[in-house]
Amino acid sequence: MLRKERLQLILKEVNVHNKVLSAELSEKLSVSEDTIRRDLHELAEEGVIVKVHGGAMSKTFHYPFDGNSKVYAVSAKQKIADKAIGLMKNDMSILIEGGTTIMEIVKKIPLKLRANFFTLSPQTAIALSDHENIEVMCIGGRLAKNGNLFTGASVINQLAGIRIDLCIIGVNGLSSKEGLTDSDWEVVQVIKAMMRSAKKTAVVTIAEKLNTVKKIKISDLDSIHYLITELPPGSSSLSAYKGGQLVKM
């Protein structure tokens, strides 16, 4: 593989998944981790990614309020947001995390919606504060800087003490066989706790993440109630994800 092609693939992986590990890229591209680190350094110098310990993040994921950074697949994420809004009803308690798709959902929340929102993301909390009919509760703990998400035992304990109507989560890996997966152990524990606290869980993801698997399992598909992508529900790309109580939107 030519170096230029490798850099393009790395950039796409970062944009699709928001954050990637050097070890995963090394395995996927069959090159050494030293090579990947040099590639990430070069892309960071060009200003197209943010290099973090052990890997890299997309600029919009790290700096969600920076208007100079373009959101990857923004039109797809806006379609997802339109569908997710349809699940929200007045007087609901709704639990959300962070990420570029979640931010597009927050932007589209109707001003007339009256609801209680719980979030583990400081950026999401700030964005929600613009809605005068929404009460915003932050669930805090140690900030995972490579995910802009509060994690740790205090977060899991707080989640165990609440009962949520609807939990909306993004996903790093999603497969019909392996279910929901991620690369970050602490993030996985928090997402599991989020799902346990909710009556219903909706997973939001662009179609490019379908059929991808990360190192650590979160849950099987039968633990979620809604799968929301930009694709129409009858799309052949979603046929492997039917079954049980899962509703494709």
Image (cartoon, grey):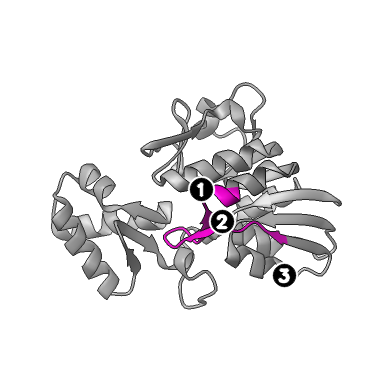
Magenta-highlighted residues: 137-155
Q: Read off the residue under disc 3.
A: 129
Check contact, mark 2 vs mark 3: CB within 8 A.
Answer: no
Q: Read off the residue under disc 2.
A: 101
Q: Read off the residue under disc 1.
A: 206
Quick one: SS at disc 2?
Answer: helix
Quick one: SS at disc 3?
Answer: loop
Residue 153 forms part of the magenta stretch: yes
Label 1 crowd (10 A; few <14 / some 14-19 / many >=20) = many
Amino acid beneath label 3: Ser
Residue appearing at x 14%, y 57% in the figure: 35
| Mark 2 / mark 3, whichever is N-terminal | 2
Toward which corner of the image does residue 163 lie, by quadrant? Answer: top right
Task: Relative to 16, say whether 47 is above or below.
Answer: below
Amino acid beneath label 2: Thr
Answer with left or right where residue 180 lies relative to residue 10: right
Amino acid beneath label 1: Ile
Residue 245 forms part of the magenta stretch: no
Considering depth in this image, is 31 or 211 the residue closer to the camera? 31
Residue appearing at x 70%, y 39% in the figure: 198
Whether residue 75 can be seen here: yes
Depth check, mark 1 against mark 3: the one in front is: 3
Answer with left or right where residue 35 lies relative to residue 116: left
Depth check, mark 1 against mark 2: the one in front is: 2
Residue appearing at x 68%, y 39% in the figure: 197
| Mark 1 / mark 3, whichever is N-terminal | 3
| Mark 1 / mark 2, whichever is N-terminal | 2
Quick one: SS at disc 1?
Answer: loop
Task: Give me the C-alpha separation between circle 1 and circle 2.
Answer: 8 Å
Task: Give me the C-alpha separation between circle 2 and circle 3.
Answer: 18 Å
Check contact, mark 1 vs mark 2: CB within 8 A.
Answer: yes
